[in-house]
Image: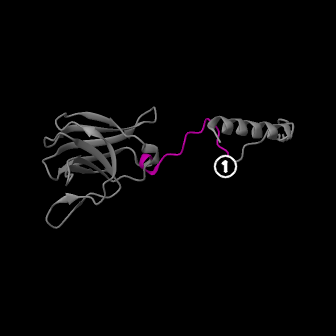
């Protein structure tokens, strides 16, 4: 069978099906009457603010940096602004020179081991890249409304294979 014959045959079958009365049944839509429903405690209104995350309920948070893989100094302040956004402010900040420093919020506490080294176990939430030598920096925290309680702020040099933490601040 040639290509043209195949196309004609498909067209003929389609036409035959259409002529046999193959139609889509429609269901009548019931009429809708409006009525007022009293709000229940579980019904939210547009004027209610969204519930705050565990992290947002902790705010404001502050902490001072301790050195880890590089000398790191300064303070961190995390607060919610009037527009609802959450910001980290680094003040008097200094750390080692690196091409790709990133800021992380962590749920684990900052602890010092027997040898005097500071650290926290998990990787945390990456917030943004930061400048190692800018003494004052303001960084917005994306996704703050979904975060659990946060205990540590860490500056990490994003270089494989170790990704060393340059410094961290215990938050409280």
Q: Residue 54, image x and y in percent?
A: 45, 51
Residue drawn at x 23%, y 58% is 119
> Above or below — where is 119 with respect to 169?
below
The front one of 11 and 130 is: 11
Position of residue 106 in the picture relative to residue 133 (left or right):
right
Position of residue 21 in the picture relative to residue 87 (left or right):
right
Range of the magenta residues? 41-56
Q: Quadrant of residue 7?
A: top right
Position of residue 149 in the picture relative to residue 51 (left or right):
left
The front one of 2 and 134 is: 2
> Above or below — where is 69 with respect to 5?
below
Judged from this view, the residue extending furthest toward the bottom is: 114
Residue drawn at x 27%, y 47% is 63
Judged from this view, the residue extending furthest toward the top is: 83
Q: Quadrant of residue 74?
A: top left
Q: Quadrant of the N terminus?
A: top right
Q: Residue 69, image x and y in percent?
A: 15, 52
Position of residue 107 in the picture relative to residue 47 (left or right):
left
Q: Quadrant of residue 77?
A: top left
The residue pinned by badge 1 equals 42
> Above or below — where is 83 with respect to 77?
above
Tag count: 1
Q: Residue 98, image x and y in percent?
A: 15, 41
Judged from this view, the residue extending furthest toward the front is: 1
Element at badge 1?
A: loop
Task: Count residues near mark 1 (Cα–Cα under 10 Å), then give few for <14, some for 14-19, many for 20+.
Answer: few
Taking the magenta stretch, the answer to whether it contains residue 50 is: yes
- Considering the whole magenta stretch, tell me its main secondary structure: loop
Taking the magenta stretch, the answer to whether it contains residue 155 is: no
Q: How is the image coloured?
A: one colour
Q: Residue 124, image x and y in percent?
A: 33, 52
């Amino acid at each position: 069978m040639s290509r043209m014959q195949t196309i004609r045959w498909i067209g003929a079958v389609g036409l035959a099906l259409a002529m046999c009365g193959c139609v889509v049944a429609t269901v009548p839509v019931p009429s809708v009457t409006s009525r007022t429903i009293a709000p229940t405690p579980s019904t939210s209104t547009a004027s209610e603010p969204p519930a705050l995350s565990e992290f947002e309920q902790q705010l404001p948070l502050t902490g001072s940096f301790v050195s880890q893989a590089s000398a790191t100094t300064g303070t961190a302040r995390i607060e919610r602004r009037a527009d609802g956004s959450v910001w980290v402010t680094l003040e008097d900040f200094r750390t080692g020179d690196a091409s790709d420093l990133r800021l992380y919020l962590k749920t684990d506490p900052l602890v010092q081991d027997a040898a005097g080294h500071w650290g926290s176990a998990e990787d945390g939430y990456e917030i943004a890249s930061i400048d190692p030598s800018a003494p004052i920096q303001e960084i917005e925290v994306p996704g703050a409304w979904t975060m659990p309680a946060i205990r540590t702020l860490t500056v990490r040099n994003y270089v494989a294979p170790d990704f060393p933490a340059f410094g961290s601040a215990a938050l409280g």
